[in-house]
Amino acid sequence: MRKFLIIATTIIGGLCWAQEEEKEKKWLIRGYVKDLLSVNIADDSTTIDNLIHNRLNFKWFPTDQINVKVELRNRLFWGETVKYVPQYGELIDVNNDYFDLSVMKGRKSLLFHSMIDRAYVEWYKDDWELRVGRQRINWGINVVWNPNDLFNAYSFFDFDYEERPGSDALLVKKYTGVASSIEIASTIADDFDEMVIAGNWKWNKWNYDFQLLAGKAREDITFGLGWAGNIKDAGFKGEVTYFSPYTGDGKNELLASVGIDYSFESSLYLNGSFLINSAAPVTPGFQESINLFSTDRLTAKDLSPFRYATFLQTSYSFHPLINGGIATIYYPSARNALFINPSVTVSLKSNLDLDLISQLYYDQFFKAYKSQARLIFIRLKWSF
């Protein structure tokens, strides 16, 4: 595996030169380098860490009908968390896919992790599309919570992974019209109970985009519905998914999220969403609440440990080069848990951005309602 990663990295690096030489541009290299400084402020201590994150996106177009894509994620961690948390590497090296395409090396307060999170071949022919390999199958519609995203659910708190996780899978798609299609997809696994096999039918009616999905998601039979349209000038989106275990263990579960967003001419943007998870408790325990920030990969059933969640977001362009906003998630419960996420983005150049981000989490543990997490991030991103 180690030799494979070295060879793959060497090939991708060499293709940067090939791209300049290739007249027909059958090769394409894109990516970025980010430096993320994080400060974790606790009641009695402050932890400082740093992450250098490099991404390489390679595309090859051998014919008009075939595309090959390989994307590599390299991360170098160092700081107090790496030094004082012995299992930190295990938290970072999360791989729920069939093939292990990652490598990790570490010593003392330094940890290097590299993973190929996209590696697939696409084939197009008339109204047909076939995709094989590690890919992102995105069936989500809403902004923050996606019950329809059976294959690749993600956490809103993991803001530094814009591309989101992928899956080792097969996808077959048939376009049945300008705004309609049928998709059938399946992951790869040794155990049938770990597989996700589902179909998705998309169509447009009454100026709304609808989707209807059905299949199995790990140990559940699942059915779902999603839509996206407008109520006057406001966007209106929603997703509903029902899970029913076929193994006899567990219980039926319904997840639904509905969102409305609106953009003003002044560039002010507003977004509100609501989530209900029928199987979750109204007021979960301490450990379940802490799992909000878990680095483990989520499933569509694990979007929130609270039964109810509300999301409000606003952003505004203060200057053509400066954008700011704040997002909040309130969990109606006996503890009134609250997540606050202010951010500011400054465009230093056309391909260089500076982000200032904070994550604050308030909850009541041991009879005291206070800030349980206070995180500050400074991120510099150069894209190429």
Image (cartoon, rainbow, N blue to C red):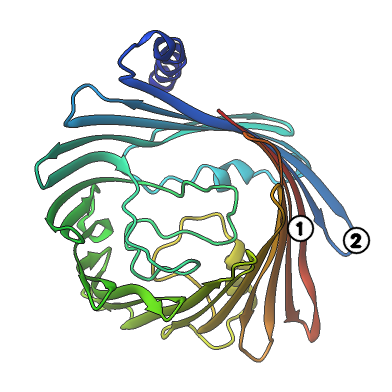
Query: Furthest-bottom residue in view?
Result: 334
> Is label 1 or label 2 in front?
1
Q: Is residue 227 visible?
A: yes
In the figure, 3 relative to 235: above or below? above
Which quadrant holds the C terminus?
top right
Which quadrant holds the N terminus?
top left
Q: CA distance from mark 1 to mark 2?
A: 14 Å
Looking at the rendered structure, the secondary structure element under dot 2 is loop
Q: Which residue is mark 2?
A: 44
- Residue at (76%, 58%) from the top-left corner? 375
In the figure, 270 relative to 34: above or below? below
In the figure, 292 relative to 364: above or below? above
* Label 1: few (<14), some (14–19) or many (≥20) C-alpha neighbours in 10 Å: some
Would you identify the image quadrant in which residue 315 lies? bottom right
Looking at the rendered structure, the secondary structure element under dot 1 is strand
Q: Which residue is mark 1?
A: 375
Q: Amino acid at mark 2?
A: Asp
Give x and y (percent) for residue 125.
Answer: 10, 39
- Residue at (23%, 53%) from the top-left corner? 191
